[in-house]
Image: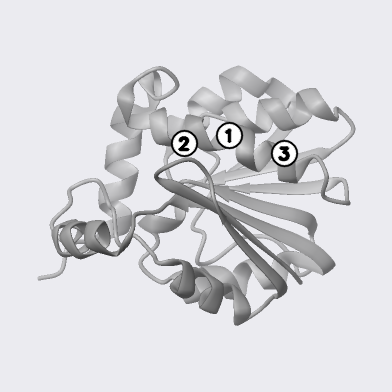
Amino acid sequence: MEPDKKQQSRAAFDQQAATYDTAIQGSHARALYPYLLQEIIHAWGDRVLDLGCGTGALMAQVLSEDAHRRVTGLDLSEGMLAQARARLGDRANLVQGDSEHLPFPDRSFDVVYCCDSFHHYPNPAAVIAEVSRVLEFGGVFLLGDIWLPLPGRLVMNPFLRWSREGDVKIYSRREITDLLGQAFHQITWRQAGGRAFVAWGVR
């Protein structure tokens, strides 16, 4: 029987939540924050959604750059959301939910970003479709995640099926741009450090 990747992710991140901001488990996400923040602060619009918001650390940085933005965070893990609530208080709207079934009306956001959680999604095409649905026309989807060159992906991806932390797949540049191209235009992809990328597209 195939493992339930969503259940695995929820359990893993509930367990990691209290130490995620300082422990090695969160180091890859933390390394991505400055790359994504640079793009978020230049994106037009006040309504912002953090997809897989974790402890709210990047949301706090977004708000420190522009306190007028209305920021919403969504995460599968209640443990992570508890950390985000402690950090952000009433400065953000925090929602427990599934990125494949976003609990928001059409065209609710001007900017959606996703930091280091896309490789946990069992149905990435459904996530792309949902992000497109909740984005305003002209809105931007920003995606930062793990990247490895082909030899690394050939080694790692077969093992991820057996990962107990909900990991699904490490994507190539072509796979990411093809996925974004299903719903967005003006697709951009660039490497961010040695083991990550940032990509985006316009609704």
Q: Quadrant of residue 87?
A: top right
Q: Kindly identify which residue carries mark 3.
A: 38
In the rendered image, which quarter contains the N terminus? bottom left
What is the spatial separation of the Cα atoms under label 3 and label 2, in whole angstroms? 15 Å
What is the spatial separation of the Cα atoms under label 2 and label 1, in whole angstroms? 7 Å
- From the top left corner, tell me how far across and down residue 50 is, in percent: 63, 46
Which of the two discs, 3 and 1, labels the residue nearer the N terminus?
Answer: 1
In the rendered image, which quarter contains the C terminus? bottom right
Q: Which mark is residue 33?
A: 1
**Disc number lying in front (3 or 2):** 3
Q: Secondary structure at mark 2?
A: helix
| 143 and 1: which is toward the camera | 143
CA neighbours of label 1 inside 10 A, class few (<14), some (14 to 19), many (20+): some
Which of the two discs, 3 and 2, labels the residue nearer the N terminus?
Answer: 2
- From the top left corner, tell me how far across and down residue 72 is, in percent: 70, 43
The answer to whether 97 is drawn above or below residue 161 in the figure is above
Q: Kindly identify which residue carries mark 2.
A: 29
| Residue at far left of view | 1
Q: Amino acid at mark 3?
A: Gln
CA neighbours of label 2 inside 10 A, class few (<14), some (14 to 19), many (20+): many
The answer to whether 113 is drawn above or below residue 99 in the figure is above
- From the top left corner, tell me how far across and down residue 83 is, in percent: 50, 23
The residue located at (81%, 63%) in the rendering is 139
